[in-house]
Image (cartoon, rainbow, N blue to C red):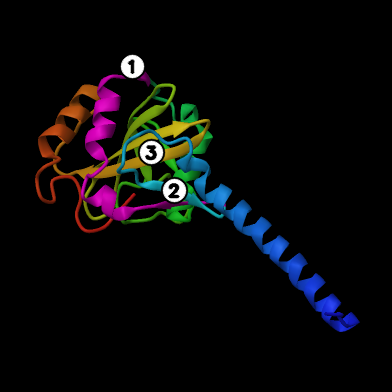
Amino acid sequence: MQLTNMTKVEISAGFIFLLFQASFNLTAQQDTNHITNIKSTNQFQSVSKIEGQYRIDTTIILTNQNLQSLLKDIDQSTLIERLDVNDIPRFITSFLEELNDEKFTIANRGEMWQETEVVDEDEVLPVHQLIYFGISKDLALMAYYTGGVAKSEHILIFKFQKKYIIDFWCGEIILKEAKNKEEILKYLKDNKEKKWGLNTNMIFL
């Protein structure tokens, strides 16, 4: 069958579009799977990356589905303690800023921070105060205070490869303090099976 010029143009344009679409889909799929390809074997991991942006599965975090695996990894790791907020890697604070959609500010122990809801407009203070930060080649454990109506302690666990966060968990300690790796892990292990023991129905950083 002989094709008219119009038909040839339409087919050519359609073919180019299909090639572009296939290329785009492949690129998007590669971007989506970039973190997946370097994940560990844990089937419950809360982090993915889609179109260049981190996404977290809040259900996995709130129900502690990935916590046991992360605790096991932390238990078996030697964490180097860092007590200066400047020693927290930028890829970790960037991850928190992306999740919270705002700048992550944190003070060192003993430094001024925004502990209550009363804000001094003349002095902008960090909204968190560091309690503990420990890091290994692929794990980080972090604890800090957050103020407001009542001061609470937040605990965060990061698993990463090549500066990409591949798994993440966070929770809270209310009316109690844990200031080092051993105390933090003990609290998490003692409370991970309790309803509302570490989280409510929402994630608060």
Q: Residue at x 66, y 63 (%)?
A: 21
SS for tag 2?
Answer: strand
Residue 56 x/y as whole percent? 39, 51
Q: Which mark is residue 78?
A: 1
Q: Most extreme residue toward the front, as rendered?
A: 1
Q: Quadrant of residue 192?
A: top left
The kind of residue tagged 3 is Met
Residue 203 x/y as whole percent? 29, 54
SS for tag 1?
Answer: loop
Above-or-below relation of 105 to 142:
below
Question: Which one is closest to the eye, mark 2 or mark 1?
Answer: 2
Residue 204 x/y as whole percent? 30, 53
Left or right: residue 14 compared with residue 150: right
Residue receiving disc 3: 112
In-front residue for pair 101/13 = 13
The kind of residue tagged 1 is Thr
Question: Which one is closest to the eye, mark 3 or mark 1?
Answer: 1
Q: Residue at x 34, y 43 (%)?
A: 45
Residue receiving disc 2: 48
Q: Residues within 10 Å of mark 2 (few under 14, many from 20)?
A: many
Magenta segment: 52-80
Check if residue 24 falls in the magenta segment.
no
In-front residue for pair 195/155 = 195
Which of disc 1 and disc 2 is earlier in sequence? 2
Above-or-below relation of 172 to 3:
above
Residue 202 seen anywhere in this rendered image of the structure: yes
